[in-house]
Amino acid sequence: MIWLASLAILLPFLAAFGGMLGGPALGRLLGRLLGGRSARRDGPALIACAPVAVSLVLAAVVAFVVWQDPGERTGTLTVIDTGSVPIRVGLQVDGLSAVVALMVCCVALAVQVYSVAYMDGDRRYSSYAAFISLFTAAMLLVVFAGDLLVLYAGWEVMGICSYFLIGHHWEERANSRAAVKAFLVTRLGDVGFLIGIIVLGLGARTFEIHGVLTRVWTMPDATLTAAALLLLAGVAGKSAQFPLHTWLPDAMAGPTPISALIHAATMVAAGMYVVARLYGAFAAAPGALAVLGVIAVISMVGAALAALAQDDLKRVLAYSTISQLAVMGAALAVGAKSAAIFHLLTHGAFKALLFLAAGCVIATTGSALLAHHGGLRRGMPVTFWSMTVGFAALAGVPPFSGWFSKDSVIEAAQHAALHGGETTKAGWFAYAPLNSGPVAGEVTMTHSFGLYQDQPHWRTLPSGVAWLVYLGLLLTVALTAAYAMRAWLMAFFGEPRGTYEIREPSRIMSWTVAALAVPAAILGFFGLGAGELRPHIGPALLGIALLIVGGGAVFLLWNRDPASDPSGALGPARRVLARGFYVDELYAMAVVRPVRALARGVVRFDRRGVDAAVVGAGRGARRLGGLLRIPQNGNPQTYLTGLLAGVVVITALVVIFR
Amino acid sequence: MMAIPLFGALAMLVPADRFLRTGFAVRAFGTGVSAATLLVAVSAMTAFDFGDTSRTQLQADWAWAPAIGLRFHLGADGISLPLVVLTALLTFLCFLYTLRHPPAGGRIRLLTALLLVLEIGLIGTFTALDLVLFFVFFETVLIPMYVVIMLWGGDGRRAAAAKFILYTLLGSGLLLAGMLLVAVNAGTLDMVQLAARHGSGVSRGVQITAFALMAIGFAVKAPMWPLHTWLPDAHTEAPTVGSVLLAGVLLKMGTYGLVRVALPLAPDGAQVWAPWLGLLAVIGIIYGALACLAQRDLKRMIAYSSVGHMGFVLLGIATLTPVGINAALFGNIAHGLITGLLFFLAGAVKDRWGTTDMDAIGGGMLGTSPRLASVLTFASVASLGLPGLAGFWGEMLAMVGAYRPHADLPRAAFVTFMAVAGIGALLTAGYFLRMLAKITHGTRPAAAAAPGAVVSAQEYAAWVPLIALTLLVGLWPKTLLDVTAAPVRALFGGG
């Protein structure tokens, strides 16, 4: 079991290693052996795709075994003695990790296959594919990690992979800047994350996740809240939540498949996954959950508004990712862990679909600007229908997957709001399950019931926050429908607004997209298996009504003048929204410039202050030496005079004091 | 182990027309001698009993000056062995590099002799178990380094070399005073005996004074803020091999000395001064990082990054916990590997572009010399503390130590230090990425001359072992932590 999981991690890692060291050479060799069409590319492509495919199979086996026989399995490879709390290099497999790993492998495989066609002709394809493999391995390490520090290792490696992949086309200074920004902003959160791990680990006297969660109750409240808040900083960084969200829209500078990978399967999903993984610690610190709720509301509403006014198709999707991740955060804040993970999975499916389909659109039209698209539905039917499924799932149109998961989140929030912030009980018990049919849900529920039943004090969310989350969610539903509708209409309807031939791009690309449309459409039905994920009539009707309001309004605006942009109706607010509320400008003013000025100041101070003191001391010593040199001028007369004077003085002293 | 470089250095005194006529033959000879030393170091490692790392092994103990109780006492334990191997490795790599890329300035015979003497001094420092012997080796290192900077350095070498020697001699004076203060009070010069006593027999006041004197002496070497200003000048002016050895091993003498000499000899003094040491360490971390952020010169930036990294090492020591000391020893080795690599790369950049000014280099290095740029990226990423590479573990463990320092130390202050150190780690990432973006990304400026030279086999030979070890230690930190953990625990009087 553990071996399967570790193999699933190791394979992409080795692929990355091999691809990076000997990518082109190995590729040539393999290409010659296989007699492929283009010897330069088939080899690296094989190195990239095959290990992920095998990992996918392994992850599926792991998930199947967990479904048959739920429970936690841990394995420790070695224990590292640090002189304090030891680090256990080990993995942990349970329902939660198995199902997320399956999703990660699926999306990674889709991205790798898609990239073979998308990056055709790129001379750095080999290193690009290697970094995707490394990215996948790191994410799987996060998912399966059994120890907080092992998890952190995967977490950071993902950060650096995102840096390399976003900056893949480093010839452009803008891409390079976006890459640096992505790494630094997430790293800012990671500093908090690492300190949070240290606080949690030393508090529980173990870094093992299982051990930490069972000892959460022995820790003082203040420590726990501090640890949870520090962890949240890292989560906000990775999952691009307010106030550390600014890197994500800029990260669109990377190639489109990378955006799909970052947004759907890895990186941003890792943040919410970690909250779910360490849910015991968060649940015992209601203060942290309340903060998570507030952050989530700000992120989801703000990002949905910003998405309304973006000119760039990829940036619309980027802001929608921030907004959708915030929906998961909101679910976690109100205690609906299963709903959050459910939404994580469906979001992974439909967001990967949307990005890869957007890649098809960009490859065909040569532009990412919505203003250059239009009328694409006729020439590219596969992309059109796939993307329609994707947008429908994003907006939450029944019966597509997004509707089920969003509905379960809304239901949980409603419950929390109406019952004075009391979190839904159902959420706690589903410690693992989800992917699998009814049986797994029931079994795992009872299993984990035992784990949490006797824990004495579940604390509750402040009811104000619960209401805020609920209303924010409802508003987001309407806004999501609006921006999804706008992007859909502007890209595929009306008249073409550019000079390009509308046709499907390479077959590998469009069929990958079509394959992803299947889970995006039907994944939701799996949720019917678990009680707390079934749609409820009240929230469902409310959601559909809001959906019609949001989507309908945009449709009416657009219908009046199909050639223009519906977001023009926002008036002067449009500018503010398009710039993402000027958060970037604010940071540049409040953080970046002062740090730069400080750095220059330090250099000046180093030269004029510290070093000058040293040099000055040296000069002083020399001057002192100069004074002492005066008597030693090499003149025998002076020496003799001094000698005589000395003798006289000594004689005098002897005479006087005898 | 030391006899080989000594023999080699003496052989260099033979007049040139009699022995090894050409410069290349001399370089090859140096390589051979250092390779033999490395072999001995590696075989010492195999002879070493890893089951009992806290015991001093492979001892050599002869009477030296019996009248004053001096003994020629050498030996290695888990704390010193990794540093000995690191020294032998880096010296060997430096010679290997010099084979193809001799520094401008000629007189290769003298350089070879000096580097070998340097190696004797370094290995001696790390193995000495007698206070006076330790000090003698400690000083032996200074003169060759001074001459190396003086003769093969850049434009401002005279001032840099003078500053280096005066600064470190001043520190050494204080160090000697501190060591003798303890030794006279305790009545022995043997470090093993002194360490076993854990400071008993020496009054508290003496310990406090002695620790302060020794700490300043070592802090100059480390270097600790605000005693660091000799470092950027010396690094910037020194030739590549000089920088590599200076950053890779010389700086470690300071922190090694703190752990090996200052802590066990004056534990009470250490407790009094530890918060101040920690404070200066975190100031060093932030200060070094900020200074890097505004540097225009590649070598100077790497030099200041050393101030920041050694800040983490010093912070680890200041916590006075086993985990902190482990962090410091780990950080030492990791910094030696990574910064050694970075200086090799800076040397390679200087060979090709003729300058280390980042603005003059322009951008697009990934396009013009992709391999050099890739290795530079790797080294930078390792240096900014990515988990899975060597740099991370030292920093992380230092922060763990600072979160729960020794029971008698003020906890609140150290928790603040930890948070500040975390910010420092962020700034570290900032300046390395800025450097990478500046010189490896973008397009090559049209005005710049195309640097044609591909990476030579000797350069690869110098880089690859460092890269491999960075990966090994990073992915499998157990290799190093297992060696150091036991002696560190012994240091604190535990089993």
Image (spheres, grey):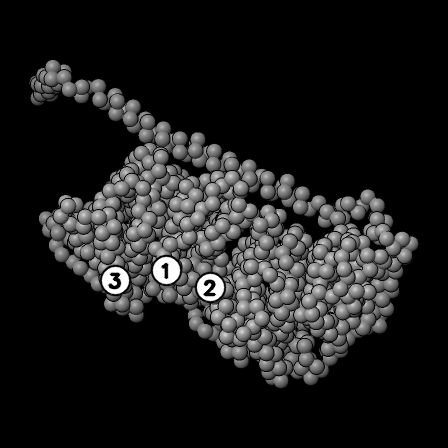
Q: Which mark is residue A21?
A: 2
Disc 3 or 1, which lies upstream in sequence?
3
* Cα separation between marks 3 and 1: 15 Å
Question: Is B348 on the left-hand or right-hand side of A580?
Answer: left
User: Could you tell me which residue is drawn at 23 percent across and 22 percent down?
Assistant: A628
Q: Residue at x 43, y 62 (%)?
A: B471
Residue position marked by numbered label 1 in the rendering: B465
**B121 or B28, which lies in front?**
B28
Q: Horizontal and vertical percent for residue A389?
A: 78, 69
Which amino acid type is shown beneath numbered disc 3? Leu
Q: Is residue B483 above or below residue A70?
A: above
Residue A469 image position (x, y, % from top left) = 75, 60
**Comparing labels 3 and 2, the label whose residue is closer to the camera:** 2
Q: Which residue is mark 3?
A: B39
Q: Position of residue B49 (x, y in %)?
A: 27, 68
Describe the element under mark 3 as helix, strand or loop.
Answer: helix
Q: Are discs 3 and 1 both within one chain?
A: yes
For disc 2, the chain is A
